[in-house]
Each structure stands twice: as C-alpha cells, then as structure tokens.
Amino acid sequence: MMKKKIILANWKMKLNFQESHKVIDEFIKIHRPNDATEVVICPSFTVLEKASEKLADTGILLGAQNCFWEQAGAFTGEISPAFLKELGCRFVIVGHSERRSNLAETDEIIHQKVKAVLEEGLTPVICVGETFEERQDGNKDFVIMNEVTKAIEGIELKPADELIVAYEPVWVIGSGQAVEPEEAKHTHQVIRQVLIDHFEAGAVNERVRIIYGGSVDSTNIKNFFEAGNIEGALVGGASLDAHNFHELILAAGQI
Ligand code: PGA
C-alpha cells in the first residue's frame, strides 16, 4: 500500500474563533483535494466543533493540538481523545516542543497520551526534536531516539492503528530557517530504525509516517519531499493564511 503524504496545519494559539473560521472558509473555497496528499487542520479546541461541520465532505481532515490521557472523569479543564473523536477529529498532536518546554510535559505524559489517542482509534502525531544545546553537545540523534522510544514503549499497533512521528528541530520552529532536507532525511532514518526495532517493519512501512516540521513553507516543501523518506509536514506559520497554505500544498504536489 502506498502511503499518502500528509500536511498538517498547526495553528497553535494564534488564531481566535473568528479568525480561524475566516481562514477555514477561504481555504475550503480554494483547496482541491487530491489522492496523493491528506490535508489536516489543527485549530484551537474552541474552533473544532464548527470546523468539523464545515469540513465534512470537503476531504480536509480535522486534528487537535493536544489531549488528556484519560477518556473521562474528574479532570477539571482537560479534554480527552474520546471527546475529540466525538467532534470528528482524526488526529491529535502529542508532545509538541512548546508543551514539553512551557508546560513541563514529560516523556511519560506523552507516552500516556499516545496510548489514549490510539485507544480511541485516532492517530497521534508525536513530536520529537532536539534543542540547539543538545545539538551543540553532539546529542541530537540520541535525544531523538530516546524521545521516540519513550513515546512508543510497550505499545502495540492494532491492524487499524496509524501513527505519525514529526521530527521538529526545536531551534528551527518559527525561525523562518528550516534545516537542510538532507539533514532531516538522516534524522528520519534514525527515527525509522527505532520504529522498526519496536514495531514490525511491515507495520512501519504501511501505517507509520515520519514527517518534518520547522519553518516549512511554499518555497522549501518540495525539497523536503524530494529527499525521499519525508512523508509529510507539520506546518505552523505558513498555514495561518489560506492562500499561503494553499500555495504550500500546491508546491508539495509538484513532485
Ligand atoms: P513553524 O511551526 O512552521 O512556524 O516553524 C511548526 C510547528 O511548531 O509545528
């Protein structure tokens, strides 16, 4: 089975309800779904319900930026994978570096979230990446291997499960300067090895995608996709405007 490429828009906490729906309305008008690429929008929680209604039958999929690790209960302020599924979400970003650093999200918390997301039949988008210091210390590959291992340890993929690992070098996010595609390609190979050591190679080939994130835009996406083992992109800044995001998707489709 040929895996489709996937492009996810991570809007972070940058667009309010009104702004988000303006972008969604514009994007629906200009986007033409194609068989080679899945497109996912991950807006704020407050936007999801109405976004789900609008995106139904457009071919554009919906994702959330975070979740809790239990499905229901006395957890004030939290939102579970089950609740997200109820709203039509198919994907949940887990362990974004902004949560790891600002909200002290640990590898163990991320692991619990990955399990909870899979339990509901949703696809976790597990973010991993090294900081600039870790890179300067020569620990990049070790950090990545460790984060991937901790996130998936003990988890078995059921036949219908899918999983995405997003390599996002922390120091590149939002900087406007992505890493070289060759570099991302190498790191993706490292991630792939960890995944194959843990899951069966067949499952990895069919149901796990390794994507890149960090200053992806319409001018560089093609180079990443051409690198060979990069199966999608997690896009922040360049997804906040419907036309920019559309350009990016068109550029990605040119390979
Ligand atoms: P960026 O963000 O594209 O603005 O660098 C990517 C992300 O944080 O997922």
Image (cartoon, grey):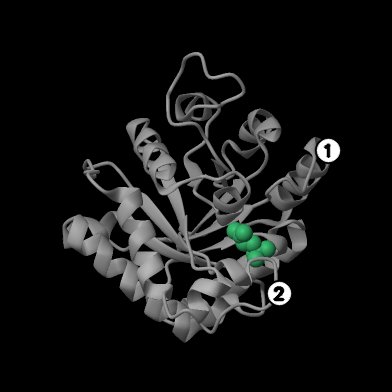
Residue 156 at x, y percent in the picture: 21, 44
* Number of marks present in the image shown: 2
Residue 127 at x, y percent in the picture: 48, 56
User: In the image, is the residue at mark 2 within 8 Å of ligand 1 by its beta carbon?
Assistant: yes
Residue displayed at 20% across by 55% down? 199
Residue 234 at x, y percent in the picture: 56, 60
Quadrant assignment, res 248: bottom right
Quadrant assignment, res 174: bottom right
The one of 45 and 96 positioned closer to us in this rendering:
96
Q: Is residue 87 left or right of residue 19?
A: left
Residue displayed at 22% across by 40% down? 158
Residue 255 visible to an observer of this rendering? no
Residue displayed at 43% across by 44% down? 110
Residue 187 badge: none
Residue displayed at 45% across by 65% down? 211
Sooner in the amino-acid sequence: mark 1 or mark 2: 1
Label 2 sits on a secondary structure element that is loop
Most distant residue in the top direction: 74
The one of 158 and 177 positioned closer to us in this rendering:
177
Quadrant assignment, res 133: bottom right
Q: Is residue 206 left or right of residue 139?
A: left
Q: Residues under labels 1 and 2: Cα distance?
A: 26 Å
Callout 2 environment at 10 Å: few (<14), some (14 to 19), or many (20+)? few
> Which residue matches tag 2?
176
> Which residue matches tag 1?
18
Residue type at mark 1 is Gln
